[in-house]
Structures are given as structure tokens and as C-alpha cells.
Amino acid sequence: MTLNLHNTYTRQKEAFRPIDPGNVRMYVCGPTVYDDIHIGNARPLVIFDVLARVLRDAYGDGNVTYARNITDVDDKIIERAAENGEEIEALTVRTTENFHAAAAALGCLPPDVEPRATDHIPQMIALIEHLIGKQHAYAEQGHVLFDVPSMPEYGKLSGRNRDEMIAGARVEVAPYKRDPADFVLWKPSADDQPGWDSPWGRGRPGWHLECSAMSEEHLGASFDIHGGGVDLVFPHHENEIAQSLCAHPDDSFARTWVHNGYLMSEGEKMSKSLGNFYTVTDLLVEFPGEALRLALLKTHYRQPLDFTRDGVREARQELNRFYRALALHETGVSDGEAHAVPNDVSDAVYDDLNTPLALSGLHAAADAAFAAETPEDVAAATGALKAAGELLGLLQQDPEVWFQGDGDAAIDALIAERIAARDAKDFARADEIRDQLAADGIVLEDGPGGTTWRREG
Ligand SMILES: [Zn+2]
């Protein structure tokens, strides 16, 4: 089956053809580890996990290399550590652990390689020297700058003209820059800042350079897919292309560029002052990670997504339905077949990751399970549902675990929310929560000691 992907570089949907089907290579920009990830960061995490699963489905488990980096040297990290009064390493280690825990809770498989920027300083210095040797970069006052006018095709990915580029990068005219569009490859470090010895003095790499060096080290100078959020197209990815193609003009760097759309939260741009800034850790107190994942997959990845808590509640109801269907399967009963992903689901996913359409295929499989009249038909329908879920990273828990583990925490959180709603005299919301739980077979009993619940039947 052909995998079609929209390529930001060519602005069209294309049939994906890997350079080497025996080693399909994808690089995705990972987190800068200065703060816990928020739901906007979770979107690319989940989307590119689905793409990695689809590539493994298409080319075989052992034939895909998915690299996602950790940016552990950056000015944001230096600033946050100073604000917290914390050692830089303590901050980056703690934040990386939180990131891994969030990724696992969202059902994301670990990438095949997870390079850290600080482990690749020699490669970054070598790349800069290479660019200076080819007259695409110059050293000035302890800085090394990429010489943007030396690359006539600069700006092709984002399609921005020169004025827009300068405005978009909010560049300062600095005395060490020959052109306002030039960007930093290396900068000097003060004594109390992290730094490494280099031909240009003690300093540290620029963010854009880190990804060019790490992708080359792990995937080569030509590879298949580069991914990230649409906010990274300019300047980050534009600058990665400039660095990598000018260093290796005979290579292609990434051939397909995949970008997910923006995420809004409760209808607005996420911001701490609006109260719609959700970290994944906070959301996981209230919701199962799988419900967050499903909520993120209900919108096509290229569309803007409006993340809402109501949307997660709906996603949890859908998962309840899927798991109720899976629970119909009697252990030991088989329809005698190995279960493939149903065609409507794989067709949708292979068509530029159309996850909303694929999810309607999961509902069709659940319908078939509820309508099945023999244990063998149930086995066939639930087998198809589970295979389809796996391609999307869903429905891999035992239904009993779903309903008791994550389910209990979710029920407790809803009950707490209902109590808060009643205290705030928001009786409509309180009733809505009671009805929602009733629909899942959860009966609430309000007594003098508080609210308890039981499962019906
Ligand atoms: Zn990057």
C-alpha cells in the first residue's frame, strides 16, 4: 500500500518513497528540557509516534530508524535554572524524566535513537568548521554566524521573502552580523554559563545547529522525513536546511517535511493568564493518558486543533465504548485468523495520516462486535478492533485494567469536579457529570459522608 504524505517543502501530498526501504529514517525535533511539556507539545509527540508506527507497519519493525533529540543546552535552560536557583544539570535531568513519563503515558513508543545535544558538541564544531571552509559562515567577536546571502535558495521551505524572514525571526542588528538575516551557529559563554572549548573560544552551539549535527550523525546527510510542529518551519527548519545543504550540497538532507498544525486550548491561544495552559502532568491527574491521545488524534494533524477538557471527556467515553466491545471477547475463542488492520482504517491512515477517518473505522469494528451473534464473530470483530487500535497506539490495555485502573482515577476526578460544580452552584454541570457517569454504568450515591459510587449490574 502506498503511503501518501503532505510535504511542506513541495506543498503537495506525495507518494512517499524512502531512500532505502531497508532503513527508513525520520528525525523529529524533540523538547528543549527547561519545563514540563504542555498539551501543545504533546501533539507532535503523538502524531509522529503514529507516523513511526505506520512506517514500521509499511516497511517492517526492524527497517525504520526514528530519531528524536533532546535539546539540553539552550538559553531558555540557562535562564530557567537561574530563576529556580537550580543547577542546570538537575533541571535538564528532571525535565527529561518528566518528558519520558508523559510520552509513555500518552502511549508513545520510545524513538530508536534519542540524541542529546551536549553529547554531540564535537560534531557541531566540525559542522561549523565545514561551513566556514565553504564560505557559508564567518566568525566575528567570539560568535560564528551563518551567512544567509551566501545561499540564494534560503527561504524555500517557509516561502517567506527576505523582509518577512527578518521580521519573523525578530532579529536584532548586532555588531557582529554582516546581514540582519544571518543567524548564530556558535556563541560565546560567560564563565557561569555552560560552554565548550572551540576554535572561536569557549562557547555553546545555537539551537538550529544542534539538529543539523544530530540528524547527520544518526541518519546521514540524506534521510527521508523530518517532522515537527508548524511553528518550527521558520526559522528553525529553514535554518537547519541552510546549514545541512550548504555543508553537503550533494546530499538532500530531509526529503519530506511533515508539520502538524497549531493547537489552541479551550478556543484560545494557550496562556498561563487565561487558565487554559495545561501541562500533560496536570491533565494526567484527571484523565487517562489514552484519552488525551485519542483527543489529539480526533483532528487531522495538519488542521488547527482546539483542545478542550470536554473533548477529552468525550474521548474517554469513546474509549469506554471500545473497551466494552473488546471485553465481549471470550478468552480461548478464536475465529482462526491472524488479525490484520481493517482496510478502511489502513487506507485512512496511509492517506496522509487521516486519523479522524481511521477512528470511524474503529467505531465500525466496535459496532460489528456488539452486533456479532457467535463467539467466533465477536473474536473476528474484536481482533480487527485491536489491530486497528495498535496502528494508532490505542486499545492495547486489558479492558479490565482500563475500567478499573485508569477508570477509577477518572471517576474520582469527575466526582471531585461535580462536588466543585455544586459548591459553585453550577448545578447544570453537576447534573451533566452525573448523567455522563450514568451513561458509563456508574451510579453515584450522595450520603452524609460524601459521594460514593458503584458500578451498575
Ligand atoms: Zn530541530
Image (cartoon, helix red, strand yellow):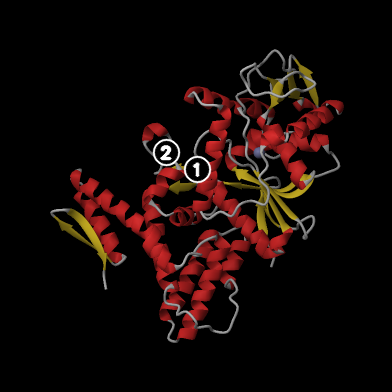
Q: Nearer the viewer, residue 438 or 452?
A: 452
When the figure is inspected, residue 391 is found, relative to residue 111, above or below; the finding is below
Rendered view: 70 above or below 285 = above
Residue at x-position 43% and y-position 68%: 399
Instruction: Tell me, yes or no, if residue 151 can be seen here.
Output: no
Is 51 located above or below residue 222 in the figure?
Answer: below
* Residue sitting nearer the eye, 76 or 429: 76
Q: Quadrant of residue 274?
A: top left
Front-lying residue, 427 or 286: 286
Residue 307 coordinates in the image, percent (x, y): 43, 47
Secondary structure under the numbered disc 1 in the rendered image: helix
Q: Residue at x 69, y 40 (%)?
A: 157
**Left or right of 333: which side holds 16?**
right
Q: Is mark 2 within 8 Å of ligand 1?
A: no
Q: Looking at the picture, how far across and down is residue 211, in whole percent?
A: 69, 38
Question: Is 3 displayed left or right of 136 in the figure?
Answer: left
Identify residue type, mark 2.
Phe
Q: Residues within 10 Å of mark 2 (few under 14, many from 20)?
A: some
| Residue 277: assigned label | 2
Expressed as whole percent of the image width and height from the top left, the position of residue 314 reads 38, 58
For badge 1, the amino acid type reads: Gly
- Checking the image for residue 40, the label placed there is 1
Locate residue 413, reporting x and y percent: 32, 51
Residue 362 is tagged as none
- Of the four image quadrants, the one with ligand 1 is top right
Which of the 4 image quarters holds residue 387? bottom right
